[in-house]
Amino acid sequence: MSPSGEYECYRHGNYPTHLHDCPKCEEAEQTERLARARIPKRYAQKNINDYKVSTAAQKNSLRIAQYFIENFEGEVQQFGKMLVFLGEPGTGKTLLATLILQAIAPKHGGLYTEASEIIQSVRRSWRKESLVTEGEVIKYYVNQTLLVIDEIGAQYCTAGEQLILESVLGLRYAHLMPTILLTNNTYEELETIILGEKIIDRLNEIAVWVPFDWESFRQPAAAHSVQNAQVISMPRRRK
Ligand SMILES: Nc1ncnc2c1ncn2[C@@H]1O[C@H](COP(=O)(O)OP(=O)(O)OP(=O)(O)O)[C@@H](O)[C@H]1O
Ligand SMILES: [Mg+2]
Ligand SMILES: [Zn+2]
């Protein structure tokens, strides 16, 4: 404590004693935790007000996300709650999941990943020259406070791939680690070829299934401007 009755941070100077930690250090740690969550740039720039809702089903998806955020330290972590967002491309699954992660990560940490990335990391660990073991890779994904796994079902869905996802999800279930799964596939496809009955049985116990069954939000305007750009940049025919 300094003579003036304040605590001292060697990096940021004095701060009042009623604060347990240096507020500037805490702020830096929050920024660092958010960066480590690896939210893709497109979504990292958004905030909850960017998630537009008009139908009852859309409002419901937002309510579930808000409930998950508000009760993260309570019910969600206590029971290791999971969310499964199912729906067609462009319906906002990645947007809503990354908005949740954005709210949780500064304080708790967390990670955004894709199913194929988990599978590839595990496969890389099998190589002779790998510096990490398969167990360490699995542990890395199991230990994330909140894990968002995007693009479930976009991989080949072999028995080997199913086994890798089964280890990560099975352990996250066992250790009560909150997880959000995103997929373009149906419940039946998840059960039969993508995750398997064992994981589906666990999800049925602790997951909230959220169907994103509305039109895509992706704007065709972007495609038009690309087409126009191509037309403009086409070489002129010589006369
Ligand atoms: N409710 C919404 N309000 C405003 N913009 C939205 C909403 N939902 C999605 N978008 C926008 O639409 C685009 C597609 O959303 P997103 O990438 O989250 O879809 P997705 O369901 O993850 O699609 P895919 O299954 O192809 O991965 C993004 O640019 C996103 O910001
Ligand atoms: Mg997506
Ligand atoms: Zn400090």
Image (cartoon, rainbow, N blue to C red):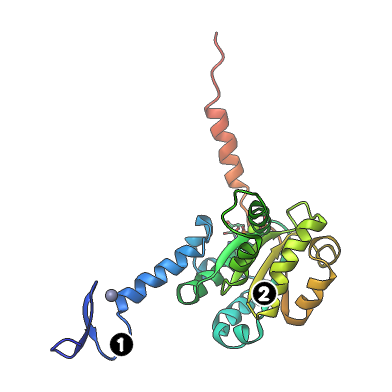
Q: Which mark is residue 19?
A: 1
Q: Is residue 213 visible?
A: no
Which three-letter amino acid code belongs to the residue tagged 2?
Arg
Left or right of 21? Residue 204 is right
- Which residue is depicted at the point 57% across and 63% down? 112
Residue 39's spot in the image, x, y percent? 52, 61
Q: Where residue 60 appears, x then y in whole percent?
A: 67, 77
- Name the residue located 46 percent from the left edge and 77 percent from the top edge: 107
Label for residue 172? 2
Q: Categorize mark 2 by other alpha carbons within 10 Å: few (<14), some (14-19), many (20+).
A: many
Query: Would residue 108 be visible to someone looking at this image?
Result: yes
Mark found first going from the N terminus, 2 or 1: 1
Indicate which quadrant contains ligand 2: bottom right
Query: Does the beta carbon of the residue at mark 1 sit less than 8 Å from ligand 3?
Result: no
Circle 2/circle 1 CB separation < 8 Å: no
Residue 140 point in image, percent of width and height: 58, 66
Q: Position of residue 216 (x, y in %)?
A: 68, 57
Residue 223 circle label: none
Which SS class for mark 2? helix
- Determine whether the residue tagged by mark 1 lies in a helix, strand or loop: loop
Amino acid carrying mark 1 in the image: Leu
